[in-house]
Every structure is written in structure tokens, then in C-alpha cells.
Image (cartoon, rainbow, N blue to C red):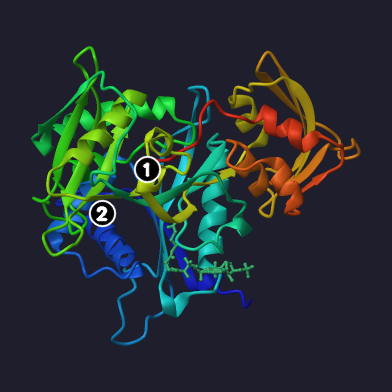
Amino acid sequence: MADLSGDYEIRRFGAASEGEEGFAEAESWIRAVAFGFHESTRTPEHVARSLETYRVDQRVLTGAYQTRQVAAGSLPADVPVATFGTLRKTLNIGFGRLLETQMVTAVTVRTSHRRRGLLRRMMSEDLELARKDGVAMAALTASEGTIYGRFGFGVASFERTVKVDTSARFSVRHQAVGSVEIADPKVLLDLAPKVFDRVHRLTPGSMGRQEWYRQGASGSLGRDGKEDPAVKVALHYGPDGAVDGYVSYKFLGWDTEPYTVQVMDLVAASNEGYLELWQFLAAIDLVERVTWEEAPLDDPLTWALSDPRCIDSSDSRDMLWLRILDVGKALEARHYPADGRLVLEVHDPLGLAAGTFALDVTGGQAAVVPVPESEAADLALDVAALSSIYLGAVCPVTLVAAGRIRENTKGAAFKAWQMFAVERATHCLTHF
Ligand SMILES: CC(=O)SCCNC(=O)CCNC(=O)[C@H](O)C(C)(C)COP(=O)(O)OP(=O)(O)OC[C@H]1O[C@@H](n2cnc3c(N)ncnc32)[C@H](O)[C@@H]1OP(=O)(O)O
């Protein structure tokens, strides 16, 4: 590949509000992102509202700009040809522990500038800066499965789209302990982050949410940048009368048959609340189908239904991708349900996390020490595979079978499976 690095300048900046210095730069950036994802041109109001949420999230906006004269009549040089956004939230790494994580989003490269190494340059620089800042983990959700493995990201959670038949056939084996009531959607501006925070602390694989979520769930800010009057909200009250769950949903209209409700957001901090919100959805009169695009694969609903075939799910997919930036820090941050010692030989295409490490777990607590490469490793794997087994998304024995892990000590992959297990199935309800 020709060295084109001199043709572009990389700039990083924050999300300025309207009237502030830097607003025009942020506005061009956000329009470039919308273009990259084939959206219609955003209205000024939509841009301003999006930037408001970005500011709350303290996002860092990275853009690549042409340094040479741009072609006559083409977009001016102050419109970035590539975009890359980041924000920092916590990741639940099991047993209630939270780890600060670099979330990567809004990655686009203008078609006329693609495959010249712009993504590689922005990604490598950003991950290196995050690691220097002491951040041990990076995360993203991927538009295509082929892009991010080369940068050390591995799949760490899955989700599926479900269509649930809520006709007379639907019956959940559960006696309600709480209740569900309809609420003004706007109550979620205040309640959604509080309820989500409880779920976040209970669910391995959960990522902290960006500001947009409470705006979207409450119908205050739709995908088109306007209020969404179609959004409806029901709250779940636990036996103590406190709100511990909610569902935000839309009726898809009388032209969609069977008559369907689409779940926009379903967040429940108790097992009972989750089943009771489903009982509520199934009880909505005139509706025979409920769809949800972010359902877990390992779903308690499947096992609570008298007829599990009420769930039609043909579409399951990878969701969260993780990338360990600092092996010692990431592994020591976890709690382990099984003690033991494993020597791991970690390869890293970007060189950030490579090395041979001894993981010693006593009483669930880990000590990780680099060891000389001459010491025989029990398992040899790349950082993407390590990131995939980190929260138990895949059994290491399966990765040995897939040729992604080399097992030098018999039984080491199974031991890793036991050590890296988390207390319940991973699920990430945050898209970013
Ligand atoms: C986290 C998120 O935001 S996910 C959203 C990702 N963005 C999109 O899908 C929007 C549409 N796509 C794009 O804008 C661009 O094609 C991008 C961002 C995916 C890639 O940008 P580019 O600047 O062309 O990538 P770059 O030239 O740095 O390529 C780096 C490597 O990835 C490979 N690569 C890049 N895109 C793809 C792809 N879509 N599929 C397979 N390989 C890819 C390149 O071949 C190259 O490989 P190499 O280093 O082994 O030679």
C-alpha cells in the first residue's frame, strides 16, 4: 500500500453545542457519520440534539481531513473523509465488577478514500492512547464481521431477534409478585438510567449506556431527531412498590398483520419483573405478536413459557466485541469462580497486549505476572480469542476445536472454561 499518511491530518475534538466555538467542526463530523451510514442529511435541529447527547457522554470525535487541495466542486476540506468516535463507560465483567472501557463507534470512511489505511491509522492510534490512559479494555459493535478481528477484537456476546406469539397460546408459568402500570413515557427521562444502572450491575457483558437511551426510550428523541409520539411505556413495580423494570414499545399499526407490538427497550432488574413485563406485553388486547430485536440467546422466557415454541427466532447474531488492551490489568480486574494457574501466550496483531503471562488465582483473586517466553505456556491464543473467553461467551474447548487456541497442556482449555465462567449468561442491552 502506498504511503498516503501525508495526505490526511487526524484531529480530535469534543462535541460543542450550538453557539460555542467548535460547533461547525462537530456539525461537519456528525454529517459525515450520517453520510457514512447512508442516512438522509440531518436537519440542523437533529444535528444540534445529537451533539447535545454527545456532550453529556463526553465523546471524543476523531476526523481525518484532506491536507492537499480538494477536487473542484467536491466536499470542502473541513468535512472529514473519515470519522471515529469514542466514549468511556463501564463494562460488567462478572460478579458485579465494573471495568472502565473505551467504546468505539461511528467508524466511517468516505468511499473515495477507503482502503488507504485510514481506519487502521485511527484505530491503532486510538487504542494506543486509551492504553496509555490506563484503560484495559475496548469495545464495539460491528457492522460487518470481517472488519475488527484484525485489530484484536473478539465476539463477547450475542443477541437475537424474537417474534413472540402472544395469542391465547402464550402462557408463562409464573405467579405475579409485583404489578405493571402504564406511565407517561417522559417518566423514563428520570427512571430509565436508574433502572438500567441496577441491571448493569447484575449482568455480565452489560455496557454502560449513552445519554441517547433515556431520550429514545421516553420518545423524546427518535432516530429521525424528532419526538416519537408512537412510543408507549409501562413500568414494573416490585413487591415493595418501587419501580424495578420498564418496557418501552410501539404498536406497528393496523396494516401490519398479525397486529404487532415492537419492543424498543426492555429493562428489568429482577427475574420476576422480566417475566411480568412479558405477561403484560402478551396481555395487550388486539395484539397477537410482540417483537424484540435485542433479546438474549439464553432467555429465561423460553424456559418459563408453557409452550416455548411461542418464540420464533431465526436471527441470532454477535453483539458486543471486546478487545483487551492490557492483559495484566484486565485479568486482575476479574473475580474467578475457580482457583488455578494458567500460563497464557498472548499474540497481538497491534502489539499492545502481547506477551506470556502467568495467571494465578487464589480465593477467586488473580495475580498476573509476565513470564519469559521460554516458559512453556498452557494455552497459546491471540488477544481476540482471549477477549472472547474473558466473559464466557464461548468455551475455550470450542476455540481449540476451531484452531483459535493451541492447547499445550491437556485439560487447560477446560480449566480456563471453569475459571473464566461468569455467574449468569452475558447479555448486552447497549448498542453504540
Ligand atoms: C464500530 C463501528 O462503527 S462499525 C461501522 C463500520 N463502518 C461501516 O460499516 C461503514 C461503511 N464502511 C466504511 O466506512 C469503511 O469501509 C470501513 C470503515 C469499514 C473501512 O475503512 P478503510 O479506511 O477502508 O479501512 P483500512 O483501509 O484502514 O483497512 C484496514 C484493513 O481492514 C480491511 N477492511 C476494511 N474494511 C473491510 C471490510 N468491510 N471487510 C473486510 N475487510 C475490511 C482492509 O482490507 C485492511 O486490511 P489489511 O490491513 O489487512 O490490508
Q: Are marks 2 and 1 in contact (CB under 8 Å)?
A: no
Q: Residue at the spot x=39%, y=33% of the render?
A: 304
Secondary structure state at the residue bearing disc 2: loop
183 sits to left or right of 119: left
**330 lies above or below 161:** above
Mark 2 vs mark 1, foreground winner is: 1
As shown in the figure, which amino acid type bears the numbered disc 1? Answer: Thr
Binning the other alpha carbons within 10 Å of mark 1 as few (below 14), some (14 to 19) or many (20 upward) gives some
Residue 216 or residue 294, whichever sits in front: 294
Disc 2 from disc 1: Cα separation = 29 Å
- Mark 1 within 8 Å of ligand 1, using the beta carbon: no
Q: Give the side of residue 367 with respect to residue 256, left or right.
A: right
Residue under label 1: 430
Q: Is residue 37 left or right of residue 48?
A: right
> Position of 167 compared to 383: left or right?
left
For label 2, the crowd category at 10 Å Cα-Cα, with few meaning under 14, some 14 to 19 and many 20 or more, is some
Residue 117 in the image, given as x and y percentages of width and height? 56, 69
Image x and y of residue 369, in percent: 76, 27
List the single residue furthest toward the bottom: 72
Q: Nearer the viewer, residue 246 or 355?
A: 246
The amino acid type of the residue labelled 2 equals Gly
- Residue position marked by numbered label 2 in the rendering: 22
**What is the quadrant of residue 218 in the picture?**
top left
Tell me which label, 2 or 1, sits earlier in the chain.
Answer: 2
